[in-house]
Image (spheres, helix red, strand yellow):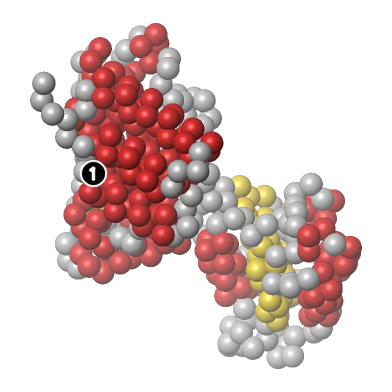
Amino acid sequence: MAAPRKSASSASASSAGTAPNIHAVLGTDEGRVKEVALKLVQQFTTPGSDDFGNDVIDGTAENSEHAGNICNNVIQALQTLPFFGGGKVVWLKNANFLGDTVVGKAQASVAGFENILDVLEQNLPTDIYFVLSASSVDKRRTAYKRLTKLANVQNFDKPDTSRAGWEAVVLNQANAKARELGITFESGALELLVQMAGDDTRQMENELEKIDVYLGERRRAGLQTVRNLVSMSRAGVVWEVGNAIGARNLQRALELVGVLLFQGQSAIGILLGAIVPKVRNLLMARDLLSRHKLNRGNYSSFTASLDALPSSATSHLPKKKDGTGLNVYPLFLSIDEATRFTLEELHAGLRACLDANAKLVTTQLDDKIVIERLLVGLLAPKARR
């Protein structure tokens, strides 16, 4: 049987083991893990068998005893010849007992998976394929090292949205999918989609397909199309709070904060995840505008004008996650918005954020009232002197 073609999606990391018929698809991006694993199973399925010759074993264990039983079922499936002749696929699907959890650390779970590896290491017949999909694997264990020596491993992890520069990872995937669909976006529209979908790459692809159907023969999507069609993830709502602050739209900011609080998001999480980063970016952008002449026409021009500044003028700006350069994109998004504020207002706003943080942590004041007072003080129109 021919080896499967590589998926169009890009794995964050991959490695090739010694056994071409053993595959592991791992990572916290559950949607991508399921998608890639299913494609592997379909590619390895014997033509004409219609999946009836395959063994698909649900790896969702309720406890350690259940995990042990699942492992025994996998071993039995690996040691059973195909009923219809030819080959078959054994798929351990959505295994949840391989990570650093109570169930995963139990002896029955550890020993069960070790037993599966013992069978796989005994030269699995070439017409039997084993596919493992799991969202969490403890990479410190000997079992993981044994697995990587055997299996062709693909890792798909969600980007860490709490770290600067996460958008670039998802934006590359969104660009690839958009090219595949033949869609182009006006400036900032694809970036808006990424922010609204957050780190959920499955949702991002679904939203692109929705836009594809909506556009019809038109192949270019604008900002309003994205705003009208894309469903916001929680990360997207958090980002929209920042947009409302940048637009100095108090009513919209209050509405979004109400949505997040209703969804169970903590007030301190909203403050530190949405409000403080936006106020800080606005302050840095406003300070840059007050000191330097910057090209704000487009992202490339803005980046070039920042690069042309002396290091002393940019040393305080946020860096990319890998430390190779400035994290310019959040500043670019804030550069025009910053003109709606004075430097004094933004300095006062950052001090107000610190005060709100102290109130949320050390007092019994209602969390919603603390956040709403902060937004009113920051965004309400100031009387002209």
Whether 299 is drawn above or below 273: the answer is above
* Number of numbered markers: 1
Residue 2 lies, in percent from the top left, at 61, 68
Q: Which amino acid, mark 1?
A: Leu
Name the side, left or right, on which 373 lies relative to 20: left
Residue plotted at (52% across, 46% down) = 159
Q: Quadrant of residue 246?
A: top left
Nearest the eye: 185 or 86: 185
Question: Tag 1: Cα neighbours inside 10 Å, few (<14), some, or many (≥20)?
Answer: many
Residue found farthest to the bottom: 84
Query: Which residue shows up at 84% across the image and 73% down it?
Result: 65
Please name whichever residue, 33 or 356, is drawn nearer the observer in this view of the structure.
356
- Percent position of residue 118, x then y: 88, 64
The residue pinned by badge 1 equals 250
Q: Does any portion of residue 214 appear in the rendered image?
A: yes
Query: Which of the pair 60/31 is nearer the observer?
Result: 60
Picture coordinates of residue 226 (x, y %)?
Answer: 25, 56
Residue 117 relative to residue 180: left or right = right
Picture coordinates of residue 109, whole percent (x, y): 83, 65
Which quarter of the image is occupied by the N terminus?
bottom right
**Dot 1: what SS?**
helix
Query: Residue placed at 87% from the left, 67% from the top?
Result: 108
Whether residue 328 is visible here, answered yes or no, is no
On the picture, is 3 further left or further right than 223?
Answer: right
In depth, the one of 138 and 18 nearer the eye is 138
| Quadrant position of the C terminus in the picture | top left
The residue shown at (38%, 65%) is 206
Does 53 sit above or below residue 265? Answer: below
Q: Residue furthest front?
A: 364
Q: Is residue 283 above or below residue 88?
A: above
